[in-house]
């Protein structure tokens, strides 16, 4: 039974969402403000975070960035801020998904289930527990079992969505992967403007991997992982 951490300042929304999630066999932890959320994440008491942006004692974007410094827990923004700029910013600060108010309870549950399924499928992708690539003079190592990424021997922290995309692209080394394929295989959803979401995740991933060009853009089609696999040991 997964535990969902809800951070929302509207008591009516908290009550309705918590009740519905509990009917669907989820446990819930509720906060009406930022205070206490980071400590709960640090304690690994939850499996997924649902986060509002406008909170009485802070900003959801800032909180998401703080969460990402300590955890790759799946994170969904649930907010009234519904412009494309707001959604893109949400993904830039580390969200895995973004749902606008008013929302469908059933849709939220489906998105939660898709994210949790993605985490499980990532965990079982251990056909090769440690994967190693080279690009020019730079190296990349993925430890799938420990869920760790190292670039030039320095650990790099990425979100769950970014991890899934990197694993998927690197499995098809030097092959062009379309945005549609990344959406269906890595992000598990499709909505208007979602191809832009893929671009945002890729941009964030590139900034964390450094300037070596591990991921190449193929204009009008998608992306290609350019690292060359190396044997270990």
Image (spheres, rainbow, N blue to C red):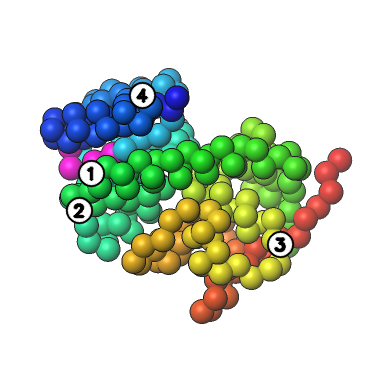
Say the numbered circle drawn on residue 65.
none
Say the numbered circle drawn on residue 53.
1
Picture residue at 47% right of the left edge, 38% below the top: 116
Picture residue at 76% right of the left edge, 43% below the top: 128
In three-dimensional space, the C-alpha distance between marks 2 and 1, rounded to whole angstroms, equals 8 Å
Q: Is residue 58 left or right of residue 168?
A: left
Answer whether labels 3 and 1 touch (C-beta < 8 Å): no
Answer whether labels 3 and 4 touch (C-beta < 8 Å): no
* Mark sitting earlier along the chain (2/3): 2
Which secondary structure lies at badge 2? loop
Magenta residues? 51-57
Nearer to us: label 4 or label 1: 4
Quarter of the image containing the N terminus?
Answer: top left
Q: Which residue is mark 2?
A: 81
Nearer to us: label 2 or label 4: 4
Q: Which residue is mark 4?
A: 27
């Amino acid at each position: 039974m997964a535990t969902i951490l809800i951070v929302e300042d509207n008591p009516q929304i908290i009550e309705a969402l918590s009740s519905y999630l509990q009917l669907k066999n989820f446990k819930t932890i509720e906060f009406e403000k930022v205070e206490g959320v980071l400590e709960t994440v640090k304690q690994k008491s939850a499996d997924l975070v649902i986060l509002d942006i406008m909170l009485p004692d802070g900003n959801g974007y800032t909180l998401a960035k703080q969460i990402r410094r300590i955890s790759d827990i799946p994170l969904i923004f649930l907010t009234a801020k519904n412009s494309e700029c707001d959604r893109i910013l949400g993904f830039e600060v580390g969200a895995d998904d973004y749902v606008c108010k008013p929302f469908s309870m059933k849709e939220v549950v489906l998105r939660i289930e898709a994210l949790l399924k993605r985490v499980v499928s990532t965990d079982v992708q251990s056909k090769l527990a440690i994967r190693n690539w080279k690009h020019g003079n730079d190296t990349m190592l993925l430890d799938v079992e420990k869920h760790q990424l190292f670039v030039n021997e320095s650990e790099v922290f990425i979100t769950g969505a970014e991890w899934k995309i990197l694993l998927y692209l690197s499995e098809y080394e030097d092959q062009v992967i379309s945005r549609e394929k990344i959406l269906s295989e890595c992000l598990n959803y499709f909505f208007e403007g979602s191809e832009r979401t893929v671009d945002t995740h890729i941009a964030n991933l590139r900034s964390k991997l450094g300037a070596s060009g591990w991921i190449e853009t193929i204009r009008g089609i998608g992306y290609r992982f350019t690292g060359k696999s190396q044997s270990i040991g």
